[in-house]
Image: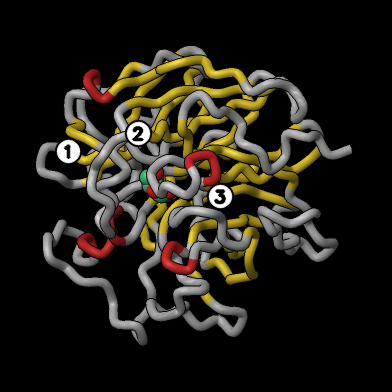
Amino acid sequence: MKSDKHNKPLVSHIYTADPSAHVFEGKLYIYPSHDLDHEQVSNDNGDQYDMEDYHVLSMEDESSPCIDHGEVLHLRDIPWAKQQLWAPDVAYKNNTYYLFFPARDYDHIFRIGVATSSSPVGPFIPEPSYIQGSFSIDPAVLVEGDQAYMYFGGLWGGQLEKWQTGEFVTDAAGPAPDAPALGPRVAELSDDMLTFKETPREISIVDPSGRTLLAGDEDRRYFEGPWMHKHNGKYYLSYSTGSTHKLVYAIGDNPYGPFTFQGTIMTPVIGWTTHHSIVEFQDKWYLFYHDSSLSGGSDNKRCLKFTELKYNADGTIQTIDPYGDG
Ligand code: FUB
């Protein structure tokens, strides 16, 4: 039976967004961004998302209360980061929990950092510098046996357009509408999870005919918030389409792709951003996401929610209407 916690704010004492959900030690842990109630200007650069710390949430099962374990990392303790702690993720390997997070450095460039803990609820101790060679936002890490891959990247405020040459170009524009869309990036992580083992590669997302999605195809092209999960041996890359506010997915045969576009996981939510994660827990699959319902629609004051995610027999995902009856 569906718990009455589905599609409701998971917590309401703080604003939360960008949930990365994982099962650690038999329990469900959720690593969100912590939205703050401030007066920053709202613009396409994302200045309104001016977050300063991370909390960890957990649930024993889908019906139990969601516990806030409190602040586990603060901006003031990260030597290289100046502002904007955006969407994080956590991975477990080497008996250690690794919190990966994007932030702007003192040159206003988004980089991706890592902090470690022996516990899934932290506290997390940051490394002195960001991961060398990292850029842009929204890290999501897939651990497969001894290997781990980081997926990342976001357009507009996430600065992915500025890295097309491999260097940061301050005023670089995005591709023309009829040119190939920018793809998210993937890099294998080193065994100690603290560095990239390789130069990040751009992921190709193609339509069912094998043609690369175009930049003007805003209903399908990659914008931000990548997530990677495996189902029946296939690799599912899911992400936000940004300007068209959808969560969509593409399927591939290996961690690097290419990935073939499939369809929509979730139709638009209240608020501009949409960001998610997918996790299998106690024999069900769940979609964690956010909307701005708790604040009455304020883009930078979001709240986490979850619902069950269902596959069809052919491996495709059933589209979810966040405000439907289903
Ligand atoms: O929360 C700040 C940014 O908004 C995230 O990094 C994006 O994915 C979007 O949700």
Tell me if mark 2 has few (under 14), some (14-19) or many (20+) residues whose alpha carbon lies within 10 angstroms of its own: some
Q: CA distance from mark 1 to mark 3?
A: 26 Å
> What's the amino acid at mark 2?
Asp
- The tag on residue 37 is 2
User: Which residue is at 17% across, 33% downward?
Assistant: 82
- Which image quadrant: the N terminus? top right
The Cα–Cα distance between marks 3 and 2, rounded to whole angstroms, is 31 Å
- Going from N to C along the chain, the mark reached first, 1 or 3, is 1
Q: Earlier in the sequence, mark 3 or mark 2?
A: 2
Mark 3 sits on what residue? Answer: 228
- State the separation of the CA atoms marked 1 and 2: 22 Å
The three-letter code of the residue at mark 1 reads Asp
Is label 2 in a helix, a strand or a loop?
loop
Read off the residue under disc 1: 105
Residue 247 found in image quarter: bottom right
Q: Is residue 232 left or right of residue 222?
A: right
Query: In the image, which is nearer the foreground, mark 1 or mark 3?
Result: 1
The image quadrant that residue 102 belongs to is top left
| Residue at (42% x, 47% y) in the render | 298
Between discs 1 and 2, the one toward the N terminus: 2
Q: Residue at x 28, y 52 (%)?
A: 42
Give the percent coordinates (x, y) of residue 62: 75, 30
- Could you tell me the amino acid type at mark 3? Met
Q: Image height check: is 292 above or below 177? A: above
State the SS at label 1.
strand
